[in-house]
Image (tube, rainbow, N blue to C red):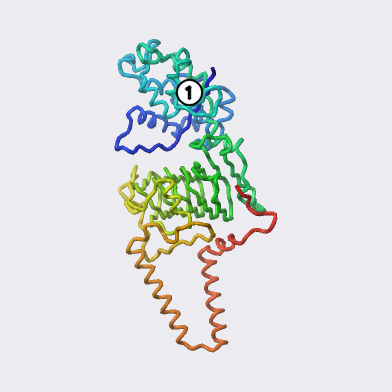
C-alpha cells in the first residue's frame, strides 16, 4: 500500500522545562532554510551544496516563491535535498565513520525516527487521517520498505532514506496548497483603483481538525470583522495587509502576521503562538499563550500572556501594554483555548539575540498614553469587562482622565450659556474633534465602520 508522507514547519511548545535533544538538533538544522548566502545571490546556487542534488525540475519550478516561510515547495525541496544530512544528524556515534558520515550498514534507532516525526507525518493510501512518521515506519506492512528490523529494533539507513525519498510530497494542508486550491472567502472588499487584490482562503473543508488554516493576504484600506466557525481552531496566516483594521473574534490555534503595515489587529484568544515578522507601525490586541516578534518597527502590543514575550532580532521601538478590550464571548473563548488571566507576563519580555547593549528596543506604554479599546460590534455573550482588569497605574490614569471630563462638564454647565452660545460652542467642539480625528488617523477607522452598500457586503463564512 502506497503511503504519502508530508512535512511541515510549525510552532511546538514543550510544557516541561526541557527539550528532546534530537528534535532540538533538527530544529537548529532547519534554520538553514532561511540563511542568506552571498554566493546564492551572485550565482543562484545554494552553498555549500548538499551532497545529493536530486531535486526534481517541477519541484524547482514550484519553489520560485520569494517567501520561504510560506512556500511549502521550498520546505519540501530543502528536506529532500538535505535528507541524508538530517538522518546522519540523528545517528548514534558508533554508526558513523571517522569522517562523521553514514555507511551502507548504518542503523537508525527508533528514537531517531520518533524525533524525525517533528518534521514529517503522513497518510496511508491517501486516507484523510494523519499519522506521525514513526507510526507509519513501524507499521508491520511497511517494514520491508522502511527498513525496520524486529530483531534489532532499528532501521536500515539506506532503506529508510530510499523510502522517504520515494514517498515524500508537499504538505497538502500548508499555506501554498491553501492559497492554490483552498476555498476562497469573500470576506474583504476589493478596493477600486488599486493593483493589489485581497486574497483570503481556507482549507477547513478538507483538512483534519489540527491542520485547519486561514490565509489572508493584501487586505488594503478597510475594516474586516469576523467571528466564524471557519476561524475556530485555525492556524491564521496574515500577509501584506496595509492601512486596515482586522477583527478575528474567534478562538484561534496560532497566528502569524508578516509584512503588514499601518494596521490594527484585534484577535480572539490564540491557543499556541502569535508571531510577527517584518511589520511596521501596527497594533496587535490579543490574549495568547506565546508572543514572539522579529524585525518589527514602531509596533504596539496590548497582550495578555502566561509566558514572557520573546523579542527576537531586528526590532525597533517595541511598545508593550496591558490587554485593554473585551467582547461578549471573550471569556468563553479563553476557556476553550486554555488561557486564564493569571499569570500575565505582558510587561516582562525576554530579549533574545540582543544586537547590542542597547536596552531601549522596547518600552512599556506610559499610563498617560493609555486608553481602553472599544470593539464596535454587537455579539451575544456574557463578558462585560476586561478579563483580569487593568494594572493599578493604568486604572488610576483612566480615573484621573474621567475626573477631568467631569470637571469640564461641570464647568460648561455652570457657565450658564444661552441657547445660541451653546450652539456656537457645540460647533467649536465638533470642529476641534474632527481636526483631532484627521490628525490622529482615527477618521479612516470610523469611516470604515459604515456598512457597505448593498451588493458589496462582506460574505458570511
Q: Nearer the viewer, residue 61 or 334?
A: 334
Q: Is residue 189 visible?
A: yes
Q: Is residue 398 above or below residue 275?
A: below
Q: Is residue 163 above or below residue 10?
A: above
Identify the residue at image location x=41%, y=33%.
31
Q: Is residue 273 visible?
A: no
User: Where does the N terminus fall, quadrant-wise?
Assistant: top right
Q: Is residue 363 above or below residue 94?
A: below
Answer few, some or many: residues within 10 Å of disc 1's Cα (few below 14, many 20 plus, some between 14 and 19): some
Estimate the x, y position of residue 305 in percent, counting from the top left. 37, 50
Identify the residue at image location x=56%, y=87%.
419
Q: Is residue 428 above or below residue 3?
A: below
Where on the picture, by quarter, is residue 383?
Answer: bottom left
Estimate the x, y position of residue 273 in percent, counting from the top left. 42, 43
Estimate the x, y position of residue 6 in percent, counting from the top left. 50, 27
Where on the picture, by quarter, is residue 112?
Answer: top left
Q: Nearer the viewer, residue 345 or 220?
A: 345
**Which residue lies under the disc numbered 1?**
81
The secondary structure type at the circle numbered 1 is helix
Q: Nearer the viewer, residue 140 or 312?
A: 140
Identify the residue at image location x=46%, y=12%.
144
Amino acid at each position: 500500500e502506497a503511503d504519502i508522507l508530508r512535512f511541515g514547519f510549525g510552532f511546538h511548545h514543550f510544557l516541561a522545562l526541557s527539550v528532546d535533544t534530537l528534535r532540538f538538533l533538527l530544529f537548529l538544522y532547519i534554520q538553514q532554510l532561511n540563511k542568506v548566502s552571498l554566493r546564492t545571490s551572485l550565482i543562484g546556487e545554494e552553498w555549500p551544496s548538499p551532497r545529493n542534488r536530486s531535486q526534481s525540475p517541477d519541484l524547482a519550478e514550484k519553489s520560485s516563491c520569494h517567501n520561504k516561510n510560506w512556500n511549502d515547495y521550498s520546505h519540501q525541496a530543502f528536506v529532500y535535498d538535505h535528507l541524508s544530512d538530517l538522518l546522519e544528524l540523528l545517528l548514534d556515534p558508533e554508526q558513523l565513520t571517522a569522517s562523521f558520515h553514514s555507511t551502507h550498514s548504518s542503523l537508525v534507532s527508533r528514537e531517531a525516527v520518533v524525533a524525525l516525526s517533528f518534521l514529517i507525518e503522513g497518510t496511508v493510501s491517501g486516507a484523510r487521517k494523519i499519522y506521525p512518521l514513526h507510526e507509519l515506519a513501524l507499521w508491520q506492512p511497511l517494514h520491508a520498505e522502511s527498513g525496520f528490523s524486529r530483531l534489532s529494533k532499528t532501521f536500515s539507513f539506506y532503506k529508510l532514506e530510499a523510502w522517504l525519498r520515494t514517498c515524500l510530497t508537499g504538505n497538502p494542508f500548508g499555506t501554498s496548497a491553501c492559497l492554490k486550491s483552498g476555498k476562497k472567502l469573500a470576506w474583504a472588499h476589493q478596493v477600486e483603483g488599486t493593483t493589489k487584490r485581497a486574497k483570503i482562503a481556507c482549507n477547513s473543508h478538507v483538512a483534519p481538525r489540527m491542520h485547519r488554516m486561514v490565509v489572508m493576504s493584501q487586505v488594503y484600506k478597510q475594516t474586516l470583522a469576523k467571528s466564524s466557525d471557519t476561524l475556530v481552531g485555525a492556524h491564521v496566516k496574515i500577509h501584506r495587509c496595509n492601512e486596515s483594521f482586522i477583527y478575528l473574534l474567534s478562538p484561534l490555534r496560532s497566528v502569524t502576521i508578516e509584512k503588514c503595515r499601518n494596521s490594527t489587529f484585534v484577535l480572539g484568544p490564540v491557543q499556541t503562538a502569535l508571531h510577527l515578522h517584518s511589520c511596521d507601525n501596527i497594533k496587535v490586541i490579543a490574549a495568547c499563550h506565546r508572543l514572539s516578534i522579529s524585525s518589527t518597527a514602531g509596533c504596539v502590543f496590548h497582550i495578555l500572556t502566561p509566558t514572557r514575550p520573546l523579542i527576537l532580532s531586528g526590532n525597533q521601538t517595541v511598545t508593550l501594554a496591558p490587554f485593554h478590550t473585551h467582547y461578549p464571548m471573550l471569556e468563553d473563548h479563553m476557556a476553550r483555548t486554555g488561557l486564564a488571566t493569571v499569570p500575565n507576563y505582558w510587561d516582562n519580555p525576554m530579549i533574545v539575540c540582543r544586537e547590542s547593549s542597547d536596552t531601549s528596543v522596547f518600552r512599556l506604554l506610559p499610563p498617560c498614553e493609555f486608553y481602553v479599546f472599544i470593539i464596535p460590534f454587537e455579539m451575544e455573550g456574557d463578558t462585560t469587562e476586561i478579563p483580569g482588569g487593568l494594572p493599578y497605574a493604568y486604572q488610576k490614569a483612566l480615573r484621573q482622565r474621567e475626573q477631568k471630563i467631569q470637571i469640564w462638564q461641570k464647568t460648561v454647565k455652570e457657565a450658564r450659556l444661552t441657547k445660541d452660545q451653546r450652539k456656537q460652542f457645540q460647533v467649536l467642539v465638533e470642529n476641534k474633534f474632527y481636526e483631532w480625528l484627521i490628525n490622529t488617523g482615527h477618521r479612516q477607522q470610523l469611516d470604515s465602520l459604515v456598512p457597505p452598500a448593498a451588493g458589496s457586503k462582506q460574505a458570511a463564512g
